[in-house]
Image: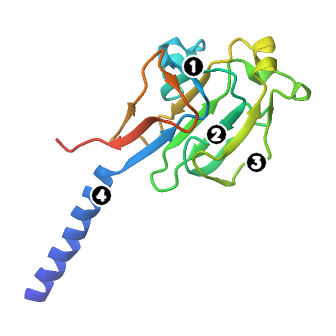
């Protein structure tokens, strides 16, 4: 009986330790672009500004055309127009969407607003190149060049998003811009 009690204690302490480790885990999300942070409510598309697609920020790019991966994970979605990407962090299943510009989906492929060598389903690393974008083409042919970086709403139970940059602040590609934390049990 004593051995059984010891086994149960060890077993339960493993769960407690794992839970503590989960609560301390931070999923870091890096800026894919150099530019200026735009408050989510100011993104000029209701689907993004109202939070229907998730929680995050807008980024108005400056003259930087290389786009970096915001976190390590799996490239779950890559639109054929190459204007939007969803990367899923494998351990927590958190998904982050990067939507480059507003109404860029309507820019014909032959205009080369975006180019990438990646394919959907591949593993990707934070701060590696996702694509190249032509701000000149986007600014002439889209509603806005503001890009949405959003933590999608799915798999967010018990977690919260912390935004590290405020509206109007400058951001450099590769700089920490958001984190996802487990909510404390308090």
Mark 2 → mark 1, Cα distance in angstroms: 23 Å
Q: Position of residue 120 (x, y in %)?
A: 72, 48
- N-term mark: 4 or 2: 4
Mark 1 → mark 3, Cα distance in angstroms: 26 Å
- 40 shown above or below 95: above
Mark 4 → mark 3, Cα distance in angstroms: 33 Å
Mark 4 → mark 2, Cα distance in angstroms: 28 Å
- N-term mark: 1 or 4: 4
- N-term mark: 4 or 3: 4
- 173 shown above or below 38: below
Judging by the rendered image, the residue that carries numbered circle 3 is 118
Q: Position of residue 79 (x, y in %)?
A: 74, 36
- N-term mark: 2 or 1: 1
Judging by the rendered image, the residue that carries numbered circle 4 is 21
Q: Which label lies toward us, 1 or 3? A: 3
Callout 3 crowding tier (Cα within 10 Å): few <14, some 14–19, many ≥20? some
- 137 shown above or below 9: above
Farthest residue to the right: give it: 110
Q: Which image quadrant: the N terminus?
A: bottom left
Q: What residue is drawn where x is 40% and y is 29%?
A: 163
| The one of 3 and 161 positioned closer to us in this rendering | 161
Q: What residue is drawn where x is 52% and y is 12%?
A: 42
Q: Which label lies toward us, 1 or 4? A: 4
Judging by the rendered image, the residue that carries numbered circle 1 is 47
Q: Which image quadrant: the C terminus?
A: top left
């Amino acid at each position: 009986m004593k051995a059984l009690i010891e086994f149960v204690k060890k077993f339960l302490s493993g769960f407690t330790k794992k839970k503590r480790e989960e609560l301390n885990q931070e999923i870091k999300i890096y800026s894919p672009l150099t530019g200026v942070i735009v408050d989510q409510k100011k993104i000029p598309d209701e689907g993004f500004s109202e939070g229907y697609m998730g929680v995050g920020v807008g980024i108005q790019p400056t003259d930087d055309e290389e786009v970096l991966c915001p976190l390590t994970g799996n490239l779950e979605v890559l639109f054929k127009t190459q204007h939007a990407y969803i990367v899923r962090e494998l351990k927590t299943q958190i998904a982050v969407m990067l939507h480059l510009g507003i109404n860029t989906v309507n820019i014909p492929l032959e205009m080369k607003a975006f180019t990438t060598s990646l394919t959907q389903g591949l593993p990707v690393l934070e701060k590696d190149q996702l694509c190249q974008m032509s701000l000149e083409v986007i600014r002439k042919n889209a509603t806005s060049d503001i890009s949405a970086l959003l933590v999608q709403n799915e798999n967010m139970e018990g977690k919260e998003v912390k935004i590290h940059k405020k509206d109007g602040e400058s951001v450099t590609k590769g700089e920490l811009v958001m984190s996802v934390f487990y909510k404390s049990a308090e």
